[in-house]
Image (tube, rainbow, N blue to C red):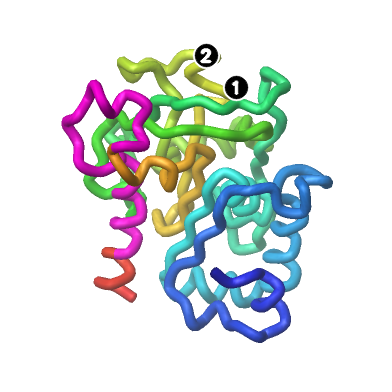
């Protein structure tokens, strides 16, 4: 674990690492909006280092507050100027949502050429993870941005019901546009998602594990295994 201030003060260097993981939490108390302050620190104090990190093909993952940070820093959906083109705002329910949700990957529906997200290699179409957030509603600045996410295969996860249908609340816990729960950049190496894969790395963390003793590991573990495997092979 490395505090962002140690990177800013050059006590530690981002170049020495191959994976940048931004975890959940409430950085700076979300006082100016979820993740906004740390997003500005990444963009304005570490911008050149972040751009070089990405250009070198390294990996980034942001979970919950980390996803909010990546979006507000312009790293997702992603552009050379680190311009913010989307956001995560207050849930439609206007309350903190703490529940388990089903997620589907729409990647198989994409017809245009795209790079599959390296973090979700080999994933089934439907998985089950917990969410815990108050500002998780994904919105894009315009319809063109949203259409681009769909066409380029950047929508990694969508909220759905147990059968994989895209439905409303509570299956979609926050009211996200297009039921978006997670996206990646065009390279597939930067992933952000509101659900918490680290809270389902063990089968025993599943709320129905006693009745469904069919899996040895939690469904979130594969995300981290894929990231590490990619780094070992290519970085």
Residue shown at the point (48%, 52%) measured from the top left: 185
Q: Nearer the viewer, residue 2 or 191?
A: 2
Is 160 located above or below residue 122 in the figure?
above
| Percent of width and height locating residue 160 | 41, 21
Residue shown at the point (60%, 24%) measured from the top left: 174
- Give the residue number, with chain letter if any, for mark 1: 175
Q: Nearer the viewer, residue 105 or 140?
A: 105
Helix, strand or loop at disc 1?
Answer: loop
Residue 197 location, quadrant: top left
Q: Which mark is residue 183?
A: none
Q: Are marks 2 and 1 in contact (CB under 8 Å)?
A: yes
Q: State yes or no: residue 224 in magenta.
A: yes
Is 72 located above or below residue 169 in the figure?
below
Q: Which mark is residue 168?
A: 2
Q: Residue at the left extreme?
A: 214
| Percent of width and height locating residue 142 | 66, 34
Q: Is residue 78 visible?
A: no
Whole-number angstrom distance, CA of label 2 to CA of label 1: 7 Å
Quarter of the figure that contains the N terminus: bottom right
| Percent of width and height locating residue 123 | 26, 41
Residue 109 location, quadrant: top left
Q: Which residues are magenta?
A: 204-228
Q: Is residue 124 visible?
A: yes
From the viewer's perspective, is 210 left or right of 142? left
């Amino acid at each position: 674990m490395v505090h962002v201030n140690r990177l800013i003060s050059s006590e530690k260097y981002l170049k020495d690492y191959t994976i940048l993981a931004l975890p959940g939490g409430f950085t700076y108390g979300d006082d100016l909006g979820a993740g906004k302050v740390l997003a500005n620190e990444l963009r304005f104090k570490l911008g050149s280092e972040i751009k070089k990190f990405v250009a070198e093909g390294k990996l980034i993952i942001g979970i919950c507050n980390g996803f909010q940070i990546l979006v507000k820093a312009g790293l997702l959906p992603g552009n050379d100027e680190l311009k913010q083109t989307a956001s995560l705002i207050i849930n439609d329910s206007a309350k903190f949502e703490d529940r388990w949700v089903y997620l589907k990957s729409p990647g198989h529906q994409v017809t245009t050429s795209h790079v599959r997200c390296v973090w979700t290699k080999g994933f089934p179409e439907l998985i089950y993870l917990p969410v815990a957030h108050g500002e998780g509603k994904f919105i894009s600045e315009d319809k063109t941005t949203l259409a681009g996410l769909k066409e380029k295969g950047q929508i990694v996860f969508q909220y759905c019901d147990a059968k994989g249908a895209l439905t409303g609340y509570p299956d979609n816990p926050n009211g996200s546009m297009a039921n978006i729960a997670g996206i990646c950049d065009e390279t597939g190496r930067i992933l952000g998602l509101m659900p918490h894969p680290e809270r389902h790395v063990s089968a025993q963390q599943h709320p129905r594990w006693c009745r469904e003793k069919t899996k040895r590991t939690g469904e979130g573990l594969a995300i981290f295994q894929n990231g590490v495997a990619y780094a070992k092979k290519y970085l």
